[in-house]
Image (cartoon, grey):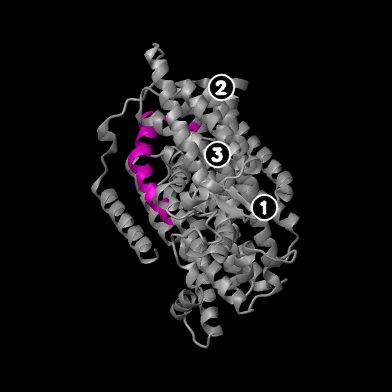
Amino acid sequence: MNKLATLDYIVFFVYFIIVASYGIWIYLRKTGHDGTMEGDSKDYFLAEGSLTWWAIGSSLIASNISAEQFVAMAGSGFKMGLAIAAYEWMAAVTLIIVGTFFIPVYLKNHIFTMPQFLHQRYNGTVAMIMAIFWLALYVVVNLTSILYLGAIAASSVSGLNIDVCIYGLAICAVIITLGGMKVIGFTDVIQVFFLILGGLATTYLALNLVAEHYGTTGAINGFNLLTSQANDHFHMILDRNNPNYIDLPGMTVLLGGLWIVNLNYWGCNQYITQRALGADLPTARGGLLFAAFLKIMMPVIVVLPGIAAFVLFKQNVFGSEMMLDGKVAPDRAYPVLLNILPVGLKGLSFAALVAAVVASLAGKANSIATIFTLDIYKKVLNKNASEKKMVAVGKISVVVAMLLGILLAPHLGIEKGGFTYIQEYTGFVSPGIFAMFILGFFWKKATSAAALFATIGGFLLSVLLKFLPIMMDLSFLSPLGFAVPVNGVYEIPFLDRMGFVFIFCVLGMILISLVQTSQGVKTNGLEIDSSMFRTNRSFAIGSVIVLIIVTALYTFYW
């Protein structure tokens, strides 16, 4: 296993010093001489009114692009090719939708957390159930998987013990998170700079290595060789004969469950929307639009290196480095590529990887602290808590969440690939949550009982459909494309499963709500003004450009 050279460590520590110094400077600017916070809990959790559009956009991407992209999505690029970029390019379109329709609803109704929205729209029971749900999901699935995948990558590149990497990443994330959302938001600008610079450098050198292996030079020649040597890795829509159809089931990526994944993640997720909730509407929309443009270029940084690693692996350039327990391990693709970089540049790319992991961990920990403090501690445990007390509780919950992540990470056992693991298990709750939000936004008759049905019923149906192949033969669904043979058993692709559960939840909510409202049950419908959804000219033009680019990419690589 390769290790970082002295120059690599120098580059990495220079990066760390820059980010830490900038974070400390921002923190000191918003504290008094005695170290007490000048702001209140909203300032700590939301950086209310202080984040610019470019800081919001950068923070969105820095928090989203983590080990699950650098490591796991590159691994998916190795395994299935460009098709996995559907998550990124559809996310660009989703950010436009969220900026146009979702954010105005949150801001007009002064929403700061997702459970707060549910409490205001439905009732306290729904809000508390979902607060607990989100905390468990964020800690057990998201925070832990980011920490685990990031540690694997850091260990593969640096040669350090994986436990040391877990501790190091957690400590760095806690240091940044304790400064609050303002520190996270502005340090994320630096994180994104290193992320993109290091990511592009890795992609360029990976493509150049492919070109050199085939007797030529240049990244463009390398890319052309990828399209010829791995032609099956350059299709956005997979057919049913593709072994990866179970993960990306054909047209579902355009018409089905992938929309639920993206709209729920970008529009109903505390971890993401928190960046925009402290800003005014034009600034929030500007940040989302900036993030959409960055999303379009992400596959260049995280997917192409995986495809390059696949081509090099086929030509025996990589051998044992890609193997784990006698099997090919796709999630090793990005760390293996980092190990071939020249001294110095390897340190820069390693810094970009660590930047992504730390930024994502910090953002997730801050969201965990926000939900726990504002929606559980303040409402149940200490209703009279002062602003100073809530900030202190938020900092304690950050540390506790990270300690739980450290304890759980070594036992995570991701076998299918990190990106698929995260998407599938988040998908157990996504359909019900999204149904509850979308009807809560735009249909005043949706009742609290209907929301509870979507939350609990959607989760139970997701579990049932997951284990249904064990109980019965689903081969009769195969001609429709809704069941795929995996190791002799017909399974329902998880994106299709999410689509089925979402439809079930929506229909159930409509039926329950109509029955209850006919019986006189009152609802807390939001006041929706059509003027809320009007956008300024720059946002409209930028949105059209994003849509044109994404449409062109899908058309070309269909």
Q: Residues within 10 Å of mark 1 (few under 14, many from 20)?
A: some
Indicate whether residue 105 is drawn in magenta: yes
Q: Quadrant of the C terminus?
A: bottom left
Q: Residues within 10 Å of mark 2 (few under 14, many from 20)?
A: some
Separation (CA) of disc 2 from disc 3:
17 Å
Along the viewing direction, whichever of 333 and 117 lies nearer the viewer = 333
Q: Is residue 440 left or right of residue 185?
A: left
N-terminal label among 2 and 3: 3
Which residue is farthest front?
476
Along the viewing direction, whichever of 103 and 398 lies nearer the viewer = 103
Along the viewing direction, whichever of 102 and 482 lies nearer the viewer = 482
Q: Give the residue number, with chain letter if any, for mark 1.
A: 414
Q: Which mark is residue 367?
A: 3
User: What is the span of residues highlighted in magenta in the rendered image?
Assistant: 89-114
Residue 360 percent across, percent down from the top left: 56, 50
Label total for image: 3
N-terminal label among 2 and 1: 2
